Image (spheres, rainbow, N blue to C red):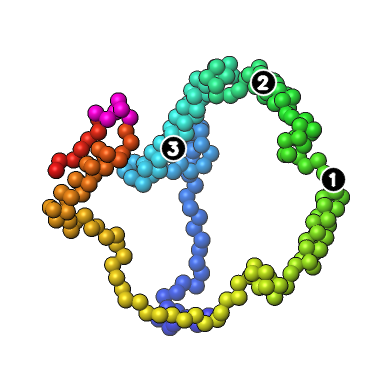
Amino acid sequence: MNIPPYLRENRPEKVEYIPPPAISYDSDSDSSGSILYRDEDDPEEDEEVEDSAGGLAAKVARRDTLALRLANRPNRTELEERNIIPSPQKSDDDKSAVKTNLTRRLSQRPTKSELQQRNILPNETQEAKVKEREEVKRQLTRKLSMRPTVKELIERKVLINWHEYVEVYEVQNYDRRGDKPWTRLTPADKASIRKELNEFKANEMTVHEESRRYTRFHKP
């Protein structure tokens, strides 16, 4: 080990070890070790103690609240009366009611023959359906084979032979609304019409004798 020269001069040749003084304990002391004292003005330790005490108090309060709620919990009979949980008797009654209702509905169900008569359930088997379909197919094929040609239909005037080109003529546009000639009548025309109507009612129109007095004539 390299030691500087200025330290070599003042360095002692041998260092003696001095043990710490022994501490004597009285016979009345209960502790077997050294006594450690805490500063009463330490705020951090006070906060730790308070936090631990508060947590313990909260835990005790929670336990007390839970115990109180468990003690005040209603029994099974009260819960059944308030319809919160079903009672065994009520469950059995409900099952019996459902069973009775289903049995009654099943007894009212129509039979297979009734369903076939009402055309709800087909009374034919799968083989019968296949045979019927084949018969319809055969009849349609026969009718299509006997169908007349287009030339025969034209000769029988069943099918009209349409031309590809049609002649079109231009026509002058005119008013297609209904004509109202009575709007152009003169007073003399109206008087002659009323006179003709009165003569027709008086001489030619057949009226019952008892109803003749109700005949209405126009003013001349």
For the residue labelled by badge 3, is the local secondary structure a helix, a strand or a loop? helix
Query: What span is in magenta?
Result: 208-213
Label 1: which secondary element: loop
Label 3: which residue?
A: 55
Q: Which residue bears the numbered disc 1? A: 125
Amino acid beneath label 1: Thr
Q: CA distance from mark 3 to mark 2?
A: 56 Å
Mark 1 or mark 2, whichever is nearer to me? 1
Residue 78 vs 47, above or below: the answer is: above
Does the magenta-highlighted stretch encompass residue 135?
no
Q: Is residue 88 visible?
A: no
1 vs 3, front mark? 1
Sequence-wise first label, 1 or 3? 3
Mark 1–mark 2 Cα distance, whole angstroms, equals 39 Å
Would residue 96 appear left or right of 24 to someone viewing this image?
right
Few, some or many residues within 10 Å of mark 1 (<14, 14–19, 20+): few
Which residue is at a point 74% across and 29% down the rendered structure image? Answer: 110
